[in-house]
Image: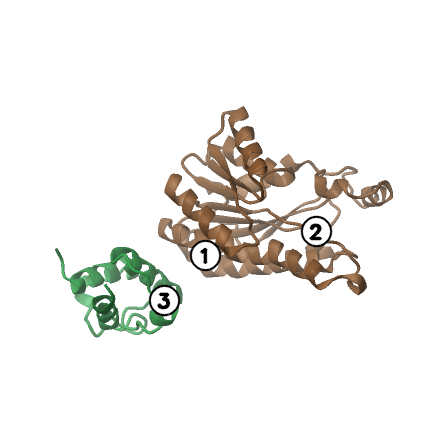
Chain colours: A brown, B green
Amino acid sequence: MSLEGKIALVTGATRGIGKAVALALAKEGATVVGTATSASGAESIQAAFEAEGFKGMGIVMNVAEPESIDQGLKKIIAELGAPLILVNNAGITRDNLLMRMKDDEWSSVVDTNLASVFRTSKAVMRGMAKARWGRIINISSVVAGMGNPGQVNYCAAKAGVEGLTRSLAKEMGNRGITANCVAPGFIDTDMTRKLDDAQRNAMMEVIPAGRFGDPGEVAAVVAFLASDAAGYVTGDTIHVNGGMYMG
Amino acid sequence: MSTVEERVKKIVCEQLGVKESEVQNSSSFVEDLGADSLDTVELVMALEEEFETEIPDEEAEKLASVQDAIDYIVAHT
């Protein structure tokens, strides 16, 4: 599954699943650019690569701002070349019941989690089309299919990402470009550590595997989808959830 | 240095996978040369790179034939 010579862009690579994905792709030989919203975040990504002796860099990019994406892409293309692997991982939650949800809670989640996928995918597509090879891998969520109270914004955005992915897979299919989603269930990250004990225990009861997942278990699936071996997998959503939801 | 016409035709051949003998100035990308919508987007991208120019989307949509592309390039570069 060597990704030697490939440039990969992973958004939201400071922590959790994004960090695990960035390191997994770098381990396969890709040169990985990890994005963070702050300079300190970008430095910590850079440090993580250097600690492992991997090729890559951390950059500051806010996926909710089109200009920030444009600038980031220009920098990557100038310094490294065109990214042929894009992992859209950056995401936020602003949970609230619909009856209480503010407009900005809705729009910030849809913008950061869904519109960003449109923008970053568009920004890398020219390079992929020219190369006749590309991998778009979008991190969705189990709740895109299941629904989840308190998350109408997050679930709408993630389900939107899955629809976008299927359309993009059809548009670019005959150019050697695949587009897929990986939908994690409950993974042990800062995002799920926000849950209280009662919530965690309730989740555990519906997970046949009897445990939360590890970010590395999501990253392994992303690394597979990024590889040449996955060239005939496109438009799909692969669930990594310990059996809590089987579609 | 090749003429604009020669360079445009060369790119059309490369992008659409057609022979030079098939490409006339009057050839329509879609009707005569078999381009689909994605092909035409990629063709415009390739023209932008060859001639180091940016073709706005609303102009790109009007480029239906080889002659349209030549005329645009001549007028804008």
- The residue under the point 39% across, 44% down is A77
Q: Is residue B58 left or right of residue B20?
A: right
The image quadrant of residue A102 is bottom right
Amino acid beneath label 3: Pro
Q: Position of residue A15 (x, y in %)?
A: 63, 37
Disc 1 target residue: A173
Disc 3 target residue: B56
Distance in Å between CA atoms under marks 1 and 3? 26 Å
Q: Position of residue A231 (x, y in %)?
A: 47, 47
Q: In this view of the protein, which residue sits in the foreground, A202 or A96?
A: A96
Distance in Å between CA atoms under marks 1 and 2? 32 Å
Mark 2 neighbour class, 10 Å CA radius: few under 14, some 14 to 19, many 20 or more: some
Query: Helix, strand or loop at disc 3?
Result: loop
Query: Helix, strand or loop at disc 2?
Result: loop
Distance in Å between CA atoms under marks 3 and 2? 36 Å
Chain that bears disc 3: B
Q: Nearer the viewer, mark 1 or mark 2?
A: 2
